[in-house]
Image (tube, rainbow, N blue to C red):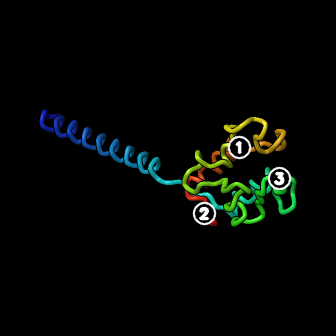
């Protein structure tokens, strides 16, 4: 093989290798930059709240009677308690609901009370995402 052919093959190999690398990096970065699917209130949040909060925060439940927070509807959930909203759409960290569920408030009032059916870390992440996405009625 002549020197010219070797240089041509080496140059071609380098171009193909670089093209492949650029292609792989492009695919990886596209996968990382894609936004996840928005959390659905009706399909995900309602069942989660029903499972963990429903026994106390249904229409006449003890949690509703004490705090005023009913979770029977989207409107009631966003209305909040006797003293105001527990969800700040777009701000999970500033939402009282998350402070209570995550235990950032007084441990005596961590929700659900008495450690009954606690919200898992995965479910907390989902709730946070839903609130950060604007707590939409979707």
Relative to 96, 67 lies left or right: right
Distance CA(mark 1)–CA(mark 2): 20 Å
Residue situated in front as seen by the camera: 126 or 89: 89
Rate crowding at label 2 as few (under 14), some (14 to 19) or many (20 or more) other CA atoms within 10 Å: some
Q: For the N terminus, give its image quadrant.
A: top left
Label ID, residue 100: 1
Residue at 17% of width from left, 40% of height from top?
8
Quarter of the image where one finds residue 44: bottom right
| Disc 2, SS | loop
Label ID, residue 66: 3
Place of residue 84 in the rendered image (x, y in percent of width and height, measured from the top left): 67, 56
Distance CA(mark 1)–CA(mark 3): 15 Å
Distance CA(mark 2)–CA(mark 3): 26 Å
Place of residue 57 in the rendered image (x, y in percent of width and height, measured from the top left): 81, 56
Place of residue 43 in the rendered image (x, y in percent of width and height, measured from the top left): 70, 62
| Disc 3, SS | helix
């Amino acid at each position: 093989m002549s020197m010219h052919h070797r240089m041509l093959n080496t140059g071609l190999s380098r171009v193909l290798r670089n093209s492949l690398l650029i292609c792989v990096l492009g695919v990886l970065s596209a996968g990382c930059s894609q936004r996840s699917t928005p959390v659905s209130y009706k399909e995900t949040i309602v069942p989660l709240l029903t499972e963990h909060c429903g026994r106390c925060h249904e229409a006449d439940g003890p949690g509703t009677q004490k705090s005023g927070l009913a979770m029977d509807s989207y409107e009631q959930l966003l209305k909040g308690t006797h003293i105001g909203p527990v969800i700040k759409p777009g701000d999970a960290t500033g939402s009282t609901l998350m402070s209570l569920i995550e235990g950032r408030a007084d441990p005596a009032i961590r929700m659900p009370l008495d450690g009954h059916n606690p919200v898992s870390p995965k479910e907390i992440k989902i709730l946070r995402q839903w609130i950060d996405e604007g707590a939409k009625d979707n």
